[in-house]
Image: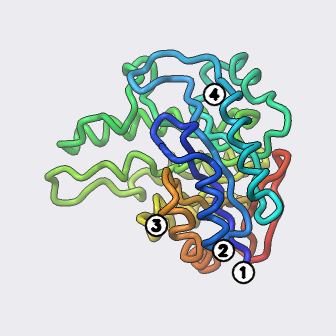
Amino acid sequence: MFLADCHTHSSCSFDADFPMAAMAKTAYEYGLTSLTLTDHCDLLGLEGETVLTYDWEPVLKQRKEMLDAFGARIDLPLGIEFGMGFLFPEAARKILSQPGLDFVIGSVHNQSQEAGGKDFYFLDYSTMDRCRAALDNYFTSMIALAAQPEFYDVVGHIIYPFRYMKGDYAVPPKVEEYRDEVFEICRLAAQNGKGIEINTWKGQTLAEWIPVLKLFREAGGEYITVGSDAHAPAPIGKGIKEAYQIMQDCGFRYVANYHERKPDMVKLK
């Protein structure tokens, strides 16, 4: 069975500790067909500081070690998770000019610069008002990202902040409340020949993607990747099979896997 985990992180990301070779070893043992390491490059840091360069050297060094060990046994495209490239186009173009780059996930991890630029992970979600303010800010940036197709192949984890909204409120915010915003993101991606990802968050978010998939289909979208967002070997591949089934239930027949910034379409079974 074809299984591709298109969103994972190695120790080349600030929030992960395992080298690429260890990630590939687990992916191979798990039975994955393809593993894409998409280490972080955010043009805003955790506290909103501007970061306009990216050091590819440690990525390429670890990648060579990984390919030497596992390149003949599993497909290992070169990826990056690229945060808010639309803010600084010149720097973004330079970073993404890396030869051999196969796949770019366009993400938003930070509030807008006007709001301070802090990573959504660190925000206070204790009240519904705070949740809604964060989501309004987030979706404004996501729409801006989706409108700049040169800086992504798929739009990453569209429902990202929802995973942290665990405050003391009777009913947490729902994706459906942001239907118009999510549809606009899907429309822009589809219109520009780009895709979205199902981010299973290590197998923890699956059904949450159903309303997003329905909107992407309504918008004429075609390209979908699936990723576990694993930051360690153990969660690699978690939720991938289940996500494929959800895709089929929503009317999609193919899953995408990227090489040379182009989607290879594999029929779901």
Disc 3 versus disc 4: distance between alpha carbons? 27 Å
Question: Residue at the spot x=81%, y=45% of the render?
Answer: 261
Nearer-N-terminus badge (1/4): 1
Indicate the quadrant where residue 48 lies.
top left
Q: Secondary structure at mark 4?
A: helix
Q: Which residue is mark 2?
A: 31
Q: Give the numbered dot on residue 141.
A: none
Tell me residue 246's x, y (percent).
56, 75
Q: Which residue is mark 4?
A: 85
Pointers 2 and 4 in contact (CB under 8 A)?
no
- Measuring 63% from the left and 61% from the top, which residue is drawn there? 25
Instruction: Say which quarter of the image contains residue 116.
Output: top left
Dot 2 or dot 1, earlier in sequence: 1
- Which residue is under mark 1? 1
Amino acid marked by disc 2? Gly
Whole-percent x, y for residue 11 in the image: 54, 41
Q: In the image, what residue type sits under mark 4?
A: Gly
* Cα separation between marks 1 and 4: 35 Å
Q: Nearer the viewer, mark 2 or mark 4?
A: 2
Give the crowd class for mark 4: few <14, some 14-19, many >=20 residues within 10 Å. many
Q: Earlier in the sequence, mark 2 or mark 4?
A: 2
Q: Is residue 220 visible?
A: no
Mark 3 or mark 2, which has the lower sequence index? 2
- Nearer to us: label 1 or label 4: 1
Instruction: Please name the residue that numbered disc 3 is placed on.
Output: 203
- Check disc 1 and report its element: helix, strand or loop: loop
